[in-house]
Image: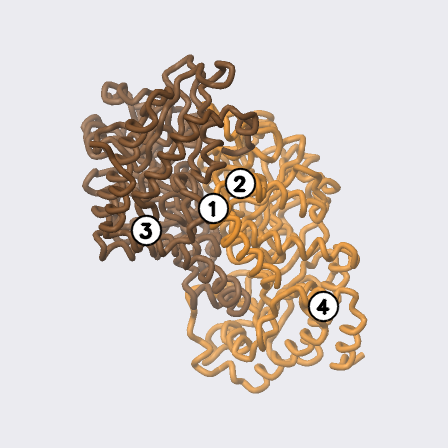
Chain colours: A brown, B orange
Amino acid sequence: MTLTLQDCRDRDAEDPLRALRDLFALPAGQIYLDGNSLGLAPRATAARVAQVVQQEWAQDLITSWNKAGWVDLPQRLGNQFAPWLGARRDELVFTDTTSINLFKVLTAAARIAAEDAPARRRLLTERSNFPTDLYIAESVCAQHGLQLVLLEPEEIPAALDDQAAILLLTHVNYRTGAMHDMAGLTAAAHAHGILCVWDLCHSAGAVPIDLHAADADFAVGCGYKYLNGGPGAPAFVWAHPRVVNRCAQPLAGWFGHAAPFAFTPGYAPADGIQRYLCGTQPIISLSALQCGLDVFSATEPLGGMAALRAKSLALTDLFIALVEQRCAGHGLGLATPLAHEKRGSQVCLTRDEGLGVDGQGSGAYAIVQALIARGVIGDFRQGDGGVGRHKDILRFGFTPLYLGFEDVWNAAEQLRQVLESGEWREARFHQRQAVT
Amino acid sequence: MTLTLQDCRDRDAEDPLRALRDLFALPAGQIYLDGNSLGLAPRATAARVAQVVQQEWAQDLITSWNKAGWVDLPQRLGNQFAPWLGARRDELVFTDTTSINLFKVLTAAARIAAEDAPARRRLLTERSNFPTDLYIAESVCAQHGLQLVLLEPEEIPAALDDQAAILLLTHVNYRTGAMHDMAGLTAAAHAHGILCVWDLCHSAGAVPIDLHAADADFAVGCGYKYLNGGPGAPAFVWAHPRVVNRCAQPLAGWFGHAAPFAFTPGYAPADGIQRYLCGTQPIISLSALQCGLDVFSATEPLGGMAALRAKSLALTDLFIALVEQRCAGHGLGLATPLAHEKRGSQVCLTRDEGLGVDGQGSGAYAIVQALIARGVIGDFRQGDGGVGRHKDILRFGFTPLYLGFEDVWNAAEQLRQVLESGEWREARFHQRQAVT
């Protein structure tokens, strides 16, 4: 069946989540498909941040540690968002960065493994995991005498053996949008006595997650992508109750102490997830993040994650169908799985090598730039230049909180026009930015 | 000579730094002597933060990584403030928290020491160092098989021997305001082959610091005290060029990679201090911090640190003199050294045990609460209850950027009235807050 613009408008009219987009500051003249890189600003954030700066800080000063609740903001935000991850009360905190939280939990996992199964010397992860995960894992492995083993996704099940201590996976792959079976892989790993650490950066707030049902051991994730917490917003960290108190994590700062304000000289970790706190947190950024979490709270009465997931899949299904129907013949392929249970909330298109200007490269970078010039904001992820399995990627994130079906139509239509006009071949679309 | 209120007013009228206080949002009806806990908000901060949220984030979104310079904000802030620490260009970054930065540099120091002098197994520090420094040092020692040795200040010189690998000191003590001789102790430590790590939390922006002249190895410090960066503002980290590239620091995240956006699977640390970055930084909090640093830039034409230090000593000299002249006979003592070269920018008063309500405790906590009720904001630091050398402390920070001589008069006068009226004995001043 051929899809039409009117079909899309009809679906927007019927969308039970449509009102949520009014909670966001929508960027003028843009279709923003990069919420998996940096989420939009909730409308409430500017006023909240102004209140923190002008009242809580400027006027109330140190009294705000108690009066405004700064002192337990990491825990309060954690409790607010915990149900969206299948976490329970007092199991989650927002603090520091994903990289730092990953260092904490991987080190804790290495310490637990050293105690329970010292002969296991391998930390398994996916070769195309987000690089900072690989870097942190490399650092933890070097410190603890572990071997870092990089696997392709299909190699993971066979690698789960009694040599492995830890399995670190990112739930939804940043390059492809492919989603792992968290419960299945965790169960398979546990059957071999392997601790499981999940990075939820590209899935928290985007897909259903139930950490307890999956029986995960540790999880970390990002506050500035689907949670709309603002640039560099603090990240989160979670540990299962059976492992949380097994050891101190290495970043043993005063906010993770059992009695932070007793100023005792010796370190005694707090019970539970509080021990994963370290130093004084950036209160302004943490307060901005709360406005992002408030949007999720507002989504609860509209159907919560089930409704978000249904819309997310409808949006990505629609985009895939429109690209197939309207952008054929331009060397595009699909990197994101078609099966719903394997798909995150993004659609990643590939483009064959040699289709770029003068037959060099894929042209994917320039196509993304030409789309951005037309107000369709996606991003580009470089492939391996044809030597391996990774093609160049055109990446489009679909955030059901603020995107509609007509947006998807328009994005696909702009892509069609960019490809058919050949305008992406213009030199101005080839200049690389420092960060893309 | 007996000091008068008019003397103080005259000194304010002659103060070349007087105009700087107009750069701050002064809390209504308060004399704020807690800038060593949380500095005041610069007036410029609210507008800057609004710009980041409403324009750079909400409208410009991911383009702000390049266009607004988010991507190198830690380095730009570092370069802006470097001269105030005697650091050179590209040697300083603002990032993460003091505790986390301390973990990075102590681990780096431990790795360097293990390579250069593996027989040295001691990390020396001061027993009354700020607790989070002790906790982080304890964690690093446990990981690297080092022994943490806690010393009284007068024991430090004799402990500098060929058993010691690292000396970690906080330049100005948080409890007493006593300042170490950074150059002298560093030279003495280096003469014994010991690496020196300095925590500048209570001295950066408050006293003259010249890291190169002192030949320090590593330094960390706080953005939310004398730098007025906002609650939980990102901290800073510095490493001497001779050690900065000696090893990777353990929090090996993507922002410390030589090519962060090349997304290569293996970690290669950047040259120089950039390798001390880890994850994505909280841009809103980091932008707020810049307004605090801008105040220091505005201080340069008025005499810079020399003028700030002269005023700071004049303020603390005045407060000490006024307490001596007008608050005698109430069991107060002075914890802060009288010698200028040993004094930070705070005055810490002690109070003898047994002078509290019903002869229990010192009453210092209640006196501080009664002062706060009168709008004089200092803070309390608990002693050891008479069993050791630490008395209860009434702590008053004097920030020359926004405090005047009449403020000091009024603070001392309120202290006199609290003591002479005995109002601090009222029950309402004895209830402890979660954070003080």
- Identify the chain of the residue marked 2, using the numbered disc in the image: B
Which residue bears the numbered disc 2?
B65
**Of the two numbered discs 4 and 1 in the rendering, the one whose residue sits closer to the viewer:** 1
Residue B73 vertical placement versus A130 (above, below): below
Residue B20, given in percent of the width and then of the height, sits at 71, 64
Q: Look at the image and tell me whether residue B97 can be seen.
A: yes
- Identify the chain of the residue marked 3, using the numbered disc in the image: A
Q: Amino acid at mark 3?
A: Asp
Question: Which of the 4 image quarters holds residue B244?
Answer: top right
What mark, if any, has residue A231 been given in the picture? Answer: 1
Question: Which of the 4 image quarters holds residue B342?
Answer: bottom right
Helix, strand or loop status at disc 3: loop
Viewer-side residue, B274 vs A178:
A178
What mark, if any, has residue A271 been given in the picture? Answer: 3
Q: Amino acid at mark 2?
A: Trp
Q: For mark 1, does the 10 Å Cα neighbourhood hold few (<14), some (14 to 19), or many (20 or more) residues?
A: many
C-alpha distance separating marks 3 and 2: 38 Å
- The residue under the point 38% across, 30% down is A416
Residue A30 vertical placement versus A137 (above, below): below
* Left or right for B40, reference B361: right
Helix, strand or loop status at disc 4: helix
Cβ–Cβ under 8 Å for marks 2 and 1: yes
Which residue bears the numbered disc 4?
B315
Q: For mark 2, does the 10 Å Cα neighbourhood hold few (<14), some (14 to 19), or many (20 or more) residues?
A: many
